[in-house]
Image (spheres, rainbow, N blue to C red):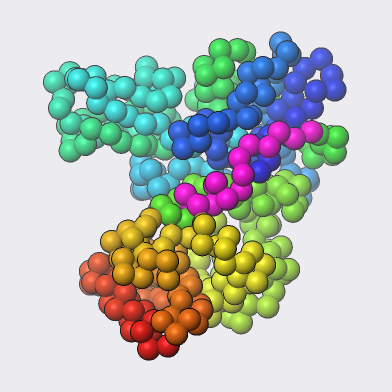
């Protein structure tokens, strides 16, 4: 994957974010982009956001239709051009002190009670101020606010300066001036896709859509790349979907099971099942860790859950050796999501045994 684009043709090093969510993310031990910047001989380093062409749209930190009052939840990290630490602050209780990673946010944490044995962190809605109160946990992940904590320096820039121990400037760059840029590659693509699918990582999914936009369009626009994909790769979907974001957090998304089966079939034909099996979880793994344990190695799929909605789509090998593509979707239920998942498990197990 492209980690950054850069220009080293002048006296400064211009770094342009490419949407890669793996930079300084704790899941990834090796970080080629960090090493490249750290080992640079340039004394003047500047981080730029890539502006789209005139009359074209970019993207916002939150997707269309996201639940605004979930801003404090770790599954709704804000989208950005240059993610740092997964755009998440991580709080851990050590003794009676709450420690924050990245440490840049330590002085933005307000802990009024030094006797806490467990805690809850609540972030201010529009800025990176964090309040610790009595709660039930000893570890918590909270999204950080993107943009500017002060009028001059961006959050991304501040985190880079604090981590690299060097001064980095910040600005915007226009598309027309980017044709000569070089690239630094970060991680193998599937090393991102596997955790994204196994733990249903919304942030990885959102940033992947922006990276796809950057490759196809030359700039990051969720709306425009969705429109482009629906007119090209997905033009033959049997039922025209409504597509709003990369993660499925938005309730504006409307994909039918027929569409999902068509997409899964495209994946099988283009990537092959060997690759798919390394990315999707099987029974007893990921978001289906409590299900399909007797079908391990025979079922591979992705779950989707919202309030009142339970979905599961994927591939099923039957006992007669057939490969079936399935998509189940239960809408507008008021019961237990666990009960519905168990009912779907029973249904798919019967299909596997019969066919």
Residue 111 lies in the magenta-colored region: no
Q: Which part of the image, by quadrant, shows the C terminus?
A: bottom left
In this rendering, would 232 be left or right of 115?
right
Nearest the viewer among 86 and 156 is 86
- 323 or 309, nearer to the observer: 323
> Could you say where residue 9 lies in the image, as x and y percent from the top left?
85, 22
Q: Is residue 167 visible?
A: yes
Tag count? 0
287 w.r.t. 218: above or below: below
Q: Position of residue 215 (x, y in %)?
A: 73, 49
Location of residue 87 in the rendering, given as x and y in whole percent from the top left corner: 48, 36
Residue at point 27%, 72% (across, down): 342
Q: Is residue 249 visible?
A: no
Residue at 24% from the left image edge and 26% from the top image edge? 93
Magenta stretch, residue numbers: 182-196
Q: Residue at x 44, y 19 (%)?
A: 104
Vertical arrangement, residue 326 with respect to residue 124, above or below: below
């Amino acid at each position: 994957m492209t980690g950054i684009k850069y220009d080293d043709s002048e006296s400064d090093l211009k770094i342009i974010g490419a949407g890669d969510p793996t930079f300084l993310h704790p899941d990834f031990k090796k970080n080629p982009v960090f090493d490249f910047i750290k080992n640079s001989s340039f004394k003047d380093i500047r981080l730029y956001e890539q502006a789209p062409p005139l009359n074209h749209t970019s993207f916002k930190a939150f997707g269309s239709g996201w639940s605004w009052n979930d801003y404090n939840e770790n599954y709704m990290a804000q989208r950005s051009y240059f993610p740092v630490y997964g755009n998440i602050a991580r709080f851990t209780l050590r003794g009676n002190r709450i420690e924050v990673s990245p440490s840049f946010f330590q002085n933005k944490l307000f802990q009024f009670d030094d006797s806490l044995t467990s805690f809850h962190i609540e972030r201010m809605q529009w800025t990176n101020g964090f309040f610790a109160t009595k709660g039930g946990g000893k570890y918590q992940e909270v999204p950080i606010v993107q943009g500017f904590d002060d009028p001059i320096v961006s959050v991304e820039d501040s985190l880079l300066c604090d981590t690299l121990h060097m001064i980095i400037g910040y600005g915007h760059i226009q598309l027309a001036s980017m044709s000569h840029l070089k690239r630094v590659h970060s991680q193998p693509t599937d090393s991102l896709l596997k955790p994204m699918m196994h733990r249903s990582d919304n942030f990885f999914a959102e940033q992947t859509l922006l990276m796809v936009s950057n490759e196809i369009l030359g700039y990051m626009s969720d709306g425009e790349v969705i429109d482009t994909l629906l007119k090209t790769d997905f033009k033959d979907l049997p039922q025209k979907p409504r597509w709003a974001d990369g993660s499925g957090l938005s309730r504006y998304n409307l994909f039918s099971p027929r569409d999902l089966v068509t997409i899964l079939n495209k994946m099988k034909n283009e990537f092959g099942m060997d690759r798919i099996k390394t990315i999707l979880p099987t029974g007893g793994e990921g978001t289906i860790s409590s299900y399909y344990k007797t079908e391990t190695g025979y079922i591979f799929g992705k779950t989707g859950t919202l309030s009142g909605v339970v979905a599961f789509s994927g591939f099923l090998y039957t006992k007669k050796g057939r490969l079936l593509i399935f998509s189940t979707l239960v809408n507008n239920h008021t019961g237990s999501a666990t009960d519905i998942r168990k009912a779907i498990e029973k249904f798919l197990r019967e299909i596997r045994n019969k066919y």
